Image (cartoon, rainbow, N blue to C red):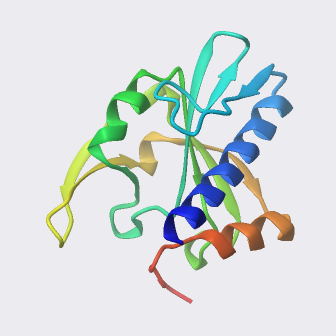
């Protein structure tokens, strides 16, 4: 079930990123291959866009990826993180662009001894916020983060 929720959340993020890119005048095409190892979206026929949809690691002020995603994120022309709603961000969805700083990655070991790669928000650019209840509620429904944060 957790995989289904993650897939649904990822699809929502990709569609929101696609709409954002279209609003900026780009021609976009969503990859229909869930296991595409190059991109989630093709932009203007030749740019590769990777989209990650998640709740950030708030204590680190960073979005995280696993090691098997690092090459894909670094090689993308456009790297977008879609931040799911939380008390920390005013219960909105935020789109962050890390395209200019996709190589600025730190590592951190979690309590359960996993190595995570961190994209600190200070290196990203907040490019869009979405407060439409339909999208916010859908993102909340599929979000699996245990973070409760401030209220």
Q: Is residue 111 above or below residue 135?
A: below
**Is residue 88 shown left or right of residue 25?**
left
Name the quadrant containing residue 80.
top right
Q: Position of residue 68 (x, y in %)?
A: 31, 40
Residue 40 vertical placement versus 142 (above, below): above
Query: Where is the C terminus found, in terms of image quarters?
Result: bottom right
Q: Residue at x 48, y 26 (%)?
A: 100
Question: Where is residue 48 shown, x and y percent of the image?
Answer: 57, 20
Name the residue located 69 percent from the left edge and 60 percent from the top edge: 93
Indicate the position of residue 15 as horizontal and vertical percent values.
75, 44
In the displayed structure, 89 sits above or below 19; it is below
Q: Does residue 7 appear left or right of residue 116 in this picture?
A: right
- Measuring from the top left, give residue 9's x and y in whole percent: 63, 59
How many circles with numbers are drawn on the protein? 0
Among all residues in the image, which is located at the extreme left?
113
Residue closest to the eye, 131 or 33: 33
Confirm whether residue 25 shows in the render: yes
* Picture residue at 46% right of the left edge, 28% below the top: 37
The answer to whether one can see residue 90 in this image is no
Viewport quadrant of the N terminus: bottom right
Find residue 78 and report its image quarter: top right
Q: Residue at x 85, y 68 (%)?
A: 134
Task: Identify the residue at the far top of this view.
Answer: 46
């Amino acid at each position: 079930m957790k995989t289904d929720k993650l897939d649904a959340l990822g699809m929502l993020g990709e569609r929101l990123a696609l709409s954002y890119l279209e609003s900026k005048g780009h021609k976009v095409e969503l990859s229909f291959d869930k296991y595409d190892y190059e991109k989630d979206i093709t932009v203007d026929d030749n740019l590769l866009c990777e989209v990650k949809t998640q709740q950030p690691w708030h204590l680190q002020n960073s979005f995280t990826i696993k090691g098997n995603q690092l090459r894909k994120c670094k090689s993308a022309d456009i790297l977008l993180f879609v931040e799911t709603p939380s008390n920390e961000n005013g219960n909105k969805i935020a789109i962050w662009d890390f395209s200019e700083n996709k190589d600025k990655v730190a590592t951190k070991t979690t309590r359960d001894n996993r190595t995570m790669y961190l994209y600190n928000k200070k290196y990203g650019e907040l490019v869009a916020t979405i407060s439409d209840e339909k999208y916010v509620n859908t993102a909340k429904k599929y979000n699996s983060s245990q973070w409760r944060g401030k209220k």
